[in-house]
Amino acid sequence: MIIRKKDYQKKLFLTMIRRHSSLSRSQIKDKAGIRLATITEITAELLDAGLVKEGKRLKADRGRQQVLLGINPSGGYSLGLEINPSRLCVSLLDLKGGVLLSREKALKKKNKFCLNELVEFSKSIIGQSGIDSSRIIGIGVALPGIVDAKNGIWISSTLMDDIKNVPLKAELENAFKVPAYLEERTHARLLGEKSLSGRKDNNILFVDLSSGIGAAVLNEGRLYRGSANSAVELGHIHIMENGPICKCGNRGCLEAVSSLEAIAKRASSALKDGVKSSILDQAGGNADDVNAEHVISAAANGDKLALGIIDDACKCLGTAVAHAVNMFNPELVIFGYESQHVIQPLIEPTWKVIRKYSLNTSFNSLRIETSCGKDFLGAVGAGMISIEHFFQMPQIQIT
Ligand SMILES: [Zn+2]
């Protein structure tokens, strides 16, 4: 890639003031090694483009004052999208990651992705926000399933129908005429969690405990993606010999034992096999209507079947998380959820298993918390990815 020296210096300038919140022209000169005359030129161009703004004045040498320069939040906007089996979520972020607007809508057809529906809804949100669409700097999309982020292909999803090698990046770039970036949904949710909660931790294991089990790792502030963007597939590690069949086709995956859907399915199946349990009363007498909340509630009342299922779920989850803790040595494990009151009773027993199977060196400095619980985690995280790309320094190849 060939980049003009001036454009490179402009990126460096922006990176510096973004990293330090605000800097004076002479501070930028010292930190970036750019000549003052060039800085004056770049400053004028960036002020004109609305990407930076002048702020407070600093008292400098010999009584002279220096104006601090910072990123102008309204200098551009990023569109963050999250596609779920039943709904679309959209968040509009300013350049500093502040959320301007978030909206969601039910998919016209459940489990069915439709590009036009996504584009129309996104454009309607931009319209509602009142911002000029030419100020959109990029789009990030959080997707369930396997994503080739490098080539912008949505490869497959067990949660959505007919997803096979969808060139979504190219389709969105064609519709919006701005760069688009795809990301696996749990990865994006971790970034959204970090942004919306204001957490400062940079080494995080995020475990999304909902109908399935997703996980993501932040390593020194960066997502750990792996060679094919499918790292930390915690839900599909083998955890139970001869366990239930998983959606991936294997048997005994963590997701097939410890996800909320698996908890409900195991209870429902036992009831249909004639096992007596108060879970049936919780579900109104119909084994097909059992959900995880019924099982957790029955376990709290001492029901034997429910206790066994919850015990298995927590043991397997705790063991898997302990393995991940031993491997990645995070400072924080965050449990994400769709419904906090449902997963809360699972946290303490799971925590005990994590403590039992993780190394003291890893566990002693470890905190375990639940998500900040804010909505639109995936959409906000996807929007943050597009902002990161906007400010990213170009890769230089030295030959
Ligand atoms: Zn699996």
Image (cartoon, rainbow, N blue to C red):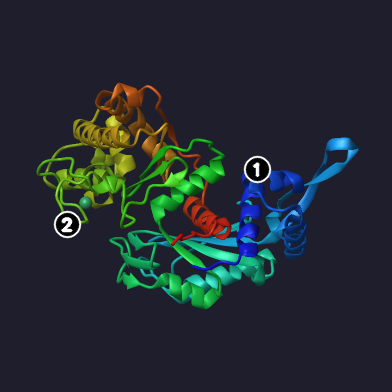
Q: Do the residues labelled 1 and 2 touch (CB within 8 Å)?
A: no
- Image coords of residue 162 (percent x, y): 30, 71
Helix, strand or loop at label 1? It is loop
Look at mark 1 in the image and give the residue it sits on.
Answer: 20
Amino acid under disc 2: Gly
Viewer-side residue, 294 vs 97: 97
- Image coords of residue 139 (percent x, y): 53, 64
User: Which residue is at 32% across, 51% downward?
Assistant: 226
- Image coords of residue 167 (percent x, y): 38, 73
Viewer-side residue, 162 vs 312: 162
User: Which residue is at 37% across, 68% downward?
Assistant: 153
For this orientation, the residue located farthest to the front is 399
Q: Is residue 280 visible?
A: yes
Mark 2, ligand 1, within 8 Å: the answer is yes
Tell me which corner region of the image, top left, top right, bottom left or bottom right, holds residue 302.
top left
309 sits to left or right of 125: left
Amino acid under disc 1: His
Tag of residue 249: 2
Viewer-side residue, 207 vs 277: 207
Helix, strand or loop at label 2? It is loop
Query: What quarter of the picture does the C terminus occupy?
Result: bottom left
Q: Earlier in the sequence, mark 1 or mark 2?
A: 1
Q: Nearer the viewer, mark 1 or mark 2?
A: 1
Q: In this view, does 74 lie above or below 240?
A: below
Q: How far apart are marks 1 and 2 (CA)?
A: 48 Å
249 sits to left or right of 10: left
